[in-house]
Structures are given as C-alpha cells and as structure tokens.
Amino acid sequence: MADPVALMVTDLREKYEAMPSSPKFSRLYDDADWGHMFAVLHKRLNQHFSDINGRAKSTRYYWADNSRDLLALIDEIEIDLHTLKRSGVEVEVDARYQEALDRCRPWLSPVRGSTVPEDFEPIELIEYQPVFTRAAMSVKLKKEQQPVSLKMVGSGSYAHVYSYVDPDYDIQFAVKRAKRGLDERDLLRFKQEFEVMKKLSFPYVVEVYKYNDDLNEYRMEYCDTTLREYIRKRNATLKFGTRKRIALQFLYGVNYLHVNQYLHRDISLQNILLKVYGESAVLVKLSDFGLVKDLSKDFTLTQTAMKGTHRDPLLASFKEYAVVNEMYSIAWVLAYIFTGKEKLPPSDGEIGQIIHKCASHDLSQRYQTVLALIADVEKVVASPAKATA
C-alpha cells in the first residue's frame, strides 16, 4: 500500500515544478529539494506586497482578483508547509513576512476587492535573503565547526528527534529538540527529563550527553527502532527465547529506575527503543522520561490531568503514583512482547498469569516489586506447542 504522505509530497513537488520562478529569487535558495518551491512562494509574496504598498499610497483599494489570489496563497502556504512537516521537513517563515500576512488577512475580501486600512504600515520587502528556511536543520560540532545535516526520525508531544552522523568518529547520534512554543511548565519538564537521564548509567537506559540551552536540545545515543516497530515487523517469526530476552532487558531497566528512586510513569511501546545488531541480537533502551517521578524528593512536578499511554484505572491521582501502578503499564508491554498484540492475553498459561498479576484489579495482588516479576519471568520455559518459531 502506498504511503499517503509520500504521495502528497510527490504531488507537492510536481505542483511547484510547473510554476515559474526567476533567477532573482532562485539564487536565494540552495535547498536542492525544496528551493524552487520556496523561490516561487517568495516571488508571489513579493508581488502582492509590492502592489499593496503601492495601493496604500494611492487609492487604498486592492483589486478583487488580487485579494482572492492572496487569500488563496496564504491558505496554500499553510497547507503546503504542513504537508512538508508531516514528511519530516519543518519550514520557518521569516517573522517579518509572517507578521505581514497576519496583518493583511483580516481586511482582505474575496468578493469585491479590499480596502487597505488608513493606518496600514508599508511592508518591508525582502529581496536579498531567504524568506523560507528549514527550521534549524543542522547542528554545529565543536571540533569541526561545520554544520552537519539533521534528519528527523521522530516526533512527540514536546519534542522532535533528529539523527546525524558525527564526521569525526563516523558514529550516528540523535538530537532531541524541544518544540517551539512550549509553555514554561512543559519546557521545565523537558529539561528535567535530561537532568534525570544524565544521572542514570545502565545498559538498558538511553544515554544522554549534553544540553544546549540556546536551542533547548540535548544529544543522546541513537537507537534503530521502537519496540512496537521491531516486533510488528517480525512477529510471525520471532522465537520465544528472543521475546524472553527482550522482556527481561526491559524489566532490568525498569528495576534499575526503581532502585534509584525513579518511577517512569509513561512506559509504552513507543518509549522503549532498541539498538539492533542482528536478526535476534538487540539491546533494549528505556527513553522519554518527561513524566518521571523522583521518589527521593518531596516535590515532583505533576499535572492535574494524568498523562501516560497506559493509565492504571485504579489510580485516582498522579501524585499517588507508585510501583504497583507502574505494573499496569508493564503488563501491556509484556503482553505485546510475548504475543505481538496490543491487548492483554487470557490469564491461562505461565505468561498469561504473570501479565494478569501485573494488571490485577486488586492492588494488593499485583507484583509489589519488579524484582519479584523478574524472578517469575526468568522461570518461564516455552513448551514446543507455545514456541513461536
């Protein structure tokens, strides 16, 4: 089945290839993929803004056809840049032109032309620098002092994740960058995530390196895939022994957090990453500590609304979150590891009994520690009938 986003990007590219630009604007954009599109949009905007500036000094009337065309262009820019964003290309519009568009939209009329306001301030035309730029799609390395291209590999509620190859060591790294416009509370949570992860050092937790306050980003080790994607692609052939090793690595990682007085509070298939070394050789990495709870502190940042992918139905308040509540999300992850399905399996069999003990409707019947859970998982041996491959 064709990828819808890929089809949209193809149509977008073809649409702009059929539109003329001019050397005056093309020379401003050296982006091989989208430079022509940016030049076309820049040219069209400058024509409108130049005409509006002229009409503001004379009749203060902007023609009907031109008004409709500019309104359509404003919508077109929003839609097309959103399409690029969905494909991993985030584009910034020069703040001066964005402000000009925001000023023009309210008085533009699609019917009988538009009256330019009496207090209209002329728009400063940008002719010798780009108006459209990819949003910080490079990172500078201290040794090289040369920009290195970033590739978007993921996106969440608070941040985008990019990857790049360090030219000094030929090693791939990741950059997690907070999204623009985060409120103060969410940015504090993002920084807290880094601070917690920086303190941790364990094979099954993603390693982070350095925080950049100017860009609100930090670098971390690169992982190849998520737990969800890894199992989804191999579910029909994944052997029980491999599933068990993945499950135990995951549990060792969670136990390490608990021993160090942290509760993850957002354990999910997307927040468990894997480094893949071969068809069955993998290393599990816990990530995304934005909702982490530090049990060693009297105060932990919380929100009124409880978050997390798998929220324990027995949890009344996020402040009361404890190990037994973490067990509920652990149950869903173990279910997916051993069955490949995003639902809890029947309670029969050793694995089914273990998973249902994690998610019991009676908190006192759940595992009280991850160590106890690990002990039971380590004992499980798949029968020939239950082995997957």
Image (cartoon, rainbow, N blue to C red):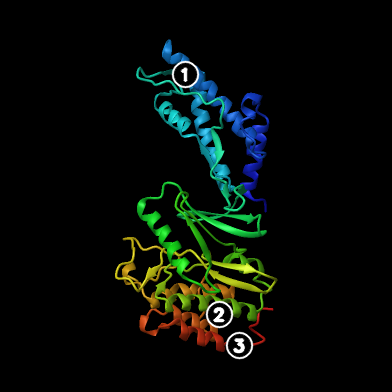
If the image is split into quadrants, where does the C terminus sit?
bottom right
For the residues labelled 3 and 1, the Cα–Cα distance comes to: 76 Å
Residue 3: x percent and y percent?
64, 51
Question: Mark 3: which amino acid?
Answer: Val
Residue 58: x percent and y percent?
43, 10
For the residues labelled 2 and 1, the Cα–Cα distance comes to: 66 Å
* Precedes in sequence: disc 2 or disc 3: 2
Q: Going by the picture, which residue comes out furthest to the front? A: 143
Q: Residue at x 56, y 30 (%)?
A: 129
Which image quadrant for residue 90? top right
Residue 379: x percent and y percent?
56, 89
Residue 106: x percent and y percent?
39, 27
Question: Mark 2: which amino acid?
Answer: Leu
Question: Mark 1: which amino acid?
Answer: Ile
What secondary structure is marked by label 1? helix
Report which residue position mark 1 lands on. Answer: 52
Which image quadrant for residue 309? bottom left
Q: Residue at x 47, y 18 (%)?
A: 52
On screen, 146 above or below 354? above
* Precedes in sequence: disc 3 or disc 1: 1
Q: Is residue 297 left or right of residue 95?
A: left
Q: Residue at x 62, y 51 (%)?
A: 144
The residue lying toward the viewer, choosing from 329 and 369, is: 369
Report which residue position mark 3 lands on. Answer: 381
Which image quadrant for residue 298? bottom left
On screen, 103 above or below 376? above
Report which residue position mark 2 lands on. Answer: 248
Task: Determine contact: label 3, label 1, CB under 8 Å.
Answer: no
